[in-house]
Amino acid sequence: MKRFFALLTACILAVAAYAQTAEEIIARMDAAMEQVSAENGFRMTMDIKIPILGTMSSDAWSLGDKMRLEANMMGKKLVTWQDGQTEWTYDANENTITVENRDQSKKSDEKENMKMFQSATEGYDVSISKETAKAWTIKCRKNSSNTNKDDPKNMEIVVAKGTFYPVSLSAKVDLVTVTMRNLQFNVTEQEVTFNQADYPGVTIIDKRM
């Protein structure tokens, strides 16, 4: 009988040790992302749902100062590459590549969006709304201390167990719903670097001063 109670106590303690609060899960997610994305870069898909217009999707790859963005909007395919100085935009319909100096004062929207994953506890009350064998679903509700008008009132973050990597983030701003998903790491230099040889016959429009 003593052995039974000792085993039961050990199991309870093990479960208690595994149980985590939403704040602890977010903190471990922050640490996991910082460790991996800084060296290996990241890839993600972003869906923007707008009433009447429907859902527009884009894929982004980021590594250091370099980024590639592929988007299909209103039947038009655009691919954009960026580095610290230059921006290249490929228009598939026109078969042109426009080269411009990158506006140094303009921050990358994708990298700014990634910050929504991180430090979600800042200005938000967080709680676990659902838990499965593979992931936690965390609700983030904007609190009174958050005076940033651009921050969404509510967000939902799904965090994978084991790795603590984010699976998805959804937020609604006015009538627009934004979902970031399919987050992956280990981006290669080739994936984020513009190579004109990949587009034979394309017309180059150089707008650099």
Image (cartoon, helix red, strand yellow):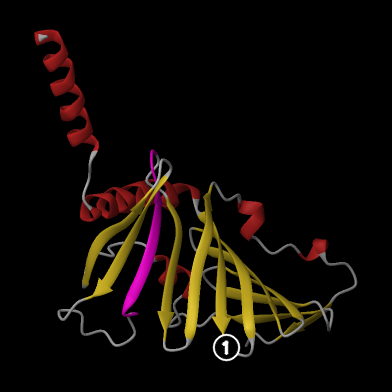
> Is residue 57 something that shows in the picture?
yes
24 lies left or right of 47: left
Q: Position of residue 85 (x, y in %)?
A: 54, 73
Q: Which residues are magenta?
A: 152-162
Compared with residue 170, is residue 166 higher up or lower down, i.e. above or below? above
200 lies left or right of 140: right
Residue 105 magenta-drawn?
no
Nearer-the-camera pick, 85 or 158: 158
Q: Secondary structure at mark 1?
A: loop
Question: Which quadrant would residue 144 be assigned to in this image?
Answer: bottom left
| Residue for point 55% across, 77% down | 48
| Residue for point 12% across, 16% down | 5
The quarter in which the N terminus is drawn is: top left
Nearer-the-camera pick, 42 or 15: 15
161 lies left or right of 178: left
Magenta stretch: helix, strand or loop mostly: strand
Q: Position of residue 204 (x, y in %)?
A: 79, 79
55 lies left or right of 37: right
Q: Position of residue 36 (x, y in %)?
A: 42, 46
- Disc 1: which residue: 51
| Residue for point 74% across, 62% down | 195
Compared with residue 50, is residue 160 higher up or lower down, i.e. above or below? above
Question: Which quadrant would residue 22 be assigned to in this image?
Answer: bottom left
